[in-house]
Amino acid sequence: MTTTTAQTLTAEVRGWTSPRRVHPMTPDAGSRIVLTDRYLLRDGRPHIPVSGEFHFTRVLRSQWDRRLRLMRAGGLTAVAAYVFWNHHQPDADAPPAFDDGRDVAAFVDACARADLDVILRVGPWCHGEVRNGGLPDWVQAADVAHRTDDPAYLALVRPWFAALGAQLAGRLGGASRVIGIQIENEIYDQPGHIATLKAMAIEAGLVAPLYMATAWGGAELPADAVLPMFGGYADGFWVDADAPWDDTFREHFFFSHVWDDPGIGADVRGARASGRGALPDGFPAVTCELGGGMATAYHRRPVLDAEDIAAVANTKIGNGSAWQGYYMYAGGINPAPGLQESQSTGYPNDLPEFDYDFHAPIGAAGIPSRTHALLRTQHAFLRYFGERVAEMPSTLPDVLPQGVHDRSTPRWAVRSDGDEGVVFVTWQQPHDALDELPPVRFDVSLPGRRVVFSDVPVAIPRGTIARFPFGLVVGGATLEWATASPLAFLARPGGGAVLVLLAHAGIPPRVRIAGETREATGELWSWSVGEDAVVVLGAQHTDDVWVIDDRILLSADEIDVADDGGVAVWHRAGGAVRILDLDALRLRVLQPAGADVTPARDLPVVRGASGAGPAATYGSRDGRAAAPGTDRVVRDGDVYTVRIPDDLQDGPLEVSVDWVGDVAAVRADDVLVGDRFWDGTDWMLRIPAGTRRLSFHVLGLHREAAVWLHPRARARLAEATAQGVLAVTAQPADQRRLHG
């Protein structure tokens, strides 16, 4: 075979430098969760949690179970949730309310039903783009030194913690599903205050194996008292409208052993000193805020592709992450007016009054995005191989990129225990597009041997987000290497095991076992080795593969699992559902039962009254443009009406709105149900059953508005012949069919 001249990429794997140590925070042998300096143990076994943020007070209680199951189907093992004080106790004269969508105990129970652990982020200051960071107005107005050990401030917090502890009685402790309590958020110079709040939480009965705090921005944390957590966003709304893509975003697309991010919260932190804190001794690398998308501020409206989100996540695993935590994973809607972060409440940014979609893997309407698809392949990898990967320290290559503007040096890293290992490759970033990398070959030095692959050098296309395994034990055989990513490792009903790999677009999937190399072709390829087998799914299934309950399923729709073990699907596209037969090593169609799927329907849009139109500015703070209030949008915006046909009024609807403008608000009949800052993407809504009419109020975007838009949105705005609501489609929201 003729080989192509290739660049050889080298790395020398080194093992752990000291024996594993259990952290004193979790000495209790009866706890489900034990913290070590390398990773977590769950029920005595190495475990890499995958957690996602879900704000239960921003989602209707009737939707909790379905969205939590969708998170579980996406490969998550845990849910993180802010508990916003001002959502529960807006008035000082009334006790905290835990009714309906504010029932935190019921939410923890719902997580348990979905087989998800819970991390409660109790603040009392949370941020979350919420008014006063979650402090009620009466607390914010109190004559106290907020977020300090001022006794008067602590006297306000203590009853709140006590109320939470009482509500959660019987659901906390070392054996419970609540594995962590986060104390405060983005506090940088008050380690003593964090320690005080932790003691108050324990006193109130808020007991969990782990206590944690955000560590970015060089935060000073009390030694050994809290688990430091980090983050990483591909882009953010918190920089100015005229700022370029910031280096603090760029760096997350590079493999590194630096975990601090000085950019997160920098605009709120202001002039307070911040350093670049190192990972504290005795702790593993843990994240709680890998951007699952990005919120939209009025002055800056980032839109990230699914590949951008997946690229950061893949890079963090390669860097040695012991916990993949996303913010947000499921978007939502503020439960009442006036609860958003805004300039009028002292923030530098205006956020929508209601919308908190975040372009998350699960949007505010409950619809999974393409980001959900790309991330769940990584999470499946961690589910089946995380116990092995946890034991593998991260090694950076011998040649590293020269700074965050280097667009030519390959970006990769290795995790290996000296025998098995994974080469992580990320060649994707937003804004400043990368060119295809010329052919490369990996040369990894292990103690006592070298692994060199592929036999045919591979060019790395833009958009590559890969995990190439080597030395992987597959039942009775060893996978020497492969240029496809591990997805699952499953037992065959008739005996033996199946390793399932996923190919990558533009990279030939080559597999080497027992000195023989083969190249996979087609949408499904298999290689049997005794009673074991390797299966490679084609790259065309990157967006539609699901791994649920040890089954490989292919569907463009949202997969759920029925109680009787059959495969249930929430249909939108209404296409086929296929399953991988692990014995026959072929794909089999699962036949649907029940009514046909009602497709999305175009609804007529009627232009109504014209409003006063947009202004060039609605004010500003610290140089950042202010948003027009919702009242002004309704008053001055152009009106568009959509009537819901009688046959679509029986149940809730998923509505897609194609529009161009600046700010819009929508009423279902006469009830205001949402708002949106335009960023070039469709607006997805979940509309209550019985709605007869939608009324959209749209303010156009003034040509002089000091607003940053993604270049795609800016180009669409320039091409648009008119602003306003252009098209609306609707489809029944809850079309669930069983397949078997």
Image (spheres, rainbow, N blue to C red):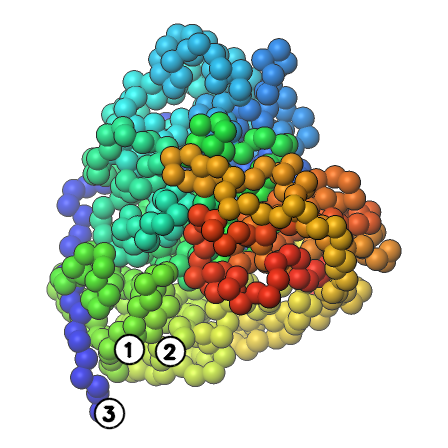
What is the three-letter code of the residue carrying label 2?
Answer: Gly
Please state the horizontal and vertical placement of residue 734, each as a whole percent of the image.
Answer: 72, 54
Q: Quadrant of the N terminus?
A: bottom left
Mark 1 in CB contact with mark 2 (< 8 angstroms): yes
Q: Residue furthest bottom?
A: 1
Q: How many marks?
A: 3
The residue shown at (61%, 75%) is: 588
Camera-side residue of 262 and 427: 262
Q: Which residue is mark 3?
A: 1
Please tell me in which quadrant of the rendered image residue 643 appears: bottom right
Is 175 positioned to the left or the right of 217 in the image? Answer: right
Q: Amino acid at mark 3?
A: Met
Instruction: Report which quarter residue 32 is drawn in.
Output: top left
Q: Secondary structure at mark 2?
A: loop
Q: CA distance from mark 1 to mark 2?
A: 8 Å
- Residue 253: name its quadrant: bottom left
Q: Residues within 10 Å of mark 3 (few under 14, many from 20)?
A: few
